[in-house]
Image: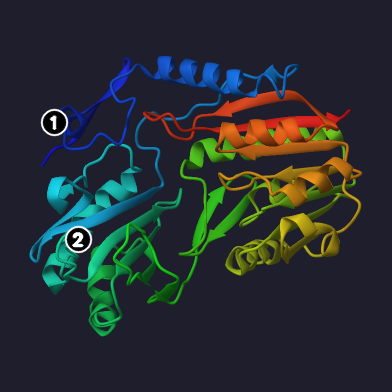
Amino acid sequence: MLTCTPVFSSFVDCRYYDAGACRSCTLMGSPYAAQVTAKQSAVAAALAPAAPDARWLPAVTGPEQGFRNKAKLVAGGVPGHVTLGILGPGGAGVDLRGCGLHEAAIVAALPHLADFVDTIGLIPYAVPTRHGELKHVVVTAAPSGELMIRFVLRSTHQEALMRSRLPRLLAALPQARVVSLNIQPKPAAIIEGDREIVLTQEDSLRMTVGPAPLYLRPDGFFQTNSTVAAALYSQAQAWIDAADPTTVWDLYCGVGGFAFAAVAPGRRVGGVEIAPGAIASARRTSAELGLTPPALTFAIGDAAHAADTLPAPPDVVIVNPPRRGLDPDLLARLDDAPATTLIYSSCNPATLARDLAALTSWRVSQARLFDMFPQTDHHEVAVVAHRV
C-alpha cells in the first residue's frame, strides 16, 4: 500500500501523488512557504480593487500534513477487498487510507473500517454497473481523538445488518462517538443524501475548537482544519473586542464558532442559521455554558432577515457565507445597517471581492489569510471593515 512520507525540511513527499494514483493536492511537492506566499499574493491581488486600503496581517498557517479533521472516502474494490479513497480510470477504486493529510486519529481508524466492511460483507457500490450498497465512508476526528463515522449507502437494505454489527465496530474503534448511515440513492456524483440514520446513542461529536465546545452533527458543517479554525475564531474575537460592541450579530452562524468567540460580559450576541440541526448544536453549547438570552440567542432563519429574530440594532456584524457569497438582499441590508464594524470570513476570494465592491458604505481596514488547506490552492480569508 502506498503511504505518505513527510519531509519536514521543505515539503510533503506523497507517494500517491508521485505514482500518479492521486493528484487532488495540486501543490504537492512545492515548498510550503512558497505555497503560502503565492496564496497571499493571489488573494491580495483579487481583493485590491475592493479593499485598496487593507493592511494584510501575517498569514496564519498550521501543520502542512495531518491537518484534515474530515476524510470523505469513496468505497471501491470488490466484496472482501474494499478500497477507501477515490475512483480511478474506469471507476476502479484507488485506496488512499494512508493519506498523510488526514489527522492521525483518522489514519489509524481507516484500516479497522476497511476490515469491518470486508468482514460483514458490505458490497462497495460500482459506478459503471450501479450495483452495490456502500458509496462512501466519511470520518471526522475531534481534537480529543473521538470520531464520527458515516457510512453512505444506496438504500436502507443493510440497515438491520449495520445495527446488528455495530457492537463489533465499536469494539474495534471505541473512540467512535457517533456512527450513522446516510442514504444517497441517486446515481450521481453526490457524496451524501438527505436522510441520516444515527445508530449510536450520541448524535453529535464534541469539537473543542476555539473558546467553546462546539457540537457537530452528521449533517453539519465544520471547518476542515481545527488548528487554523481556532486561529480564525481568535482573530475574529480580537476584532470584535477592539470594536467594544454592545450587540453582535453572527450571520450564517452554523454551530456558533464566531458567536461564542464574541461572547463577553455585558454584551448581547445573536446568531442566525437556516439549518435547524446547526442551531440545535449551538443551543446545546449555550446550555452547557449556562448562556441564555439576551446574552446569547440563536435563531433559525434567513440571514437577510436577521432583524426579525435577533437583538437589534447590531454594532458588529459577522458573516461567514457559503462559497456563493452574500445574497443581494443581505448586501443591501448590510449597507443600510446601523453597525459600524463588519467581519467577513470567506472561502472564495472571487465572491468576497464582488461583495466588498457592492458594500459601498464600508471600507476594509485589515485582512488576513488563513491557510486551511495546505497542498492546494484553497484557503480562507477574513477581513474587517468599518463604516465609511
Kindly tell me whether residue 92 is visible in this rendering. no
Q: Earlier in the sequence, mark 1 or mark 2?
A: 1
Density class for disc 1 (Cα within 10 Å; few <14, some 14-19, many ≥20) is few
* Quadrant occupied by the C terminus: top right
Q: Position of residue 78 (x, y in %)?
A: 9, 62
- Left or right: 379, with 168 as reference point: right
Residue occupying the far bottom of the picture: 160
- Left or right: 38, with 131 as reference point: right
Density class for disc 2 (Cα within 10 Å; few <14, some 14-19, many ≥20) is some
Q: Position of residue 59 (x, y in %)?
A: 56, 22
Residue at point 28%, 60% (across, down) = 136
Q: Name the amino acid, label 1.
A: Ala
Task: Indicate which disc residue 19 carries.
Answer: 1
Quadrant of residue 358 in the image?
A: top right
Q: Position of residue 14 (x, y in %)?
A: 22, 29
Q: Nearer the viewer, mark 1 or mark 2?
A: 2
Residue at point 50%, 26% (across, down) = 61
Task: Indicate which disc residue 127 carries.
Answer: 2
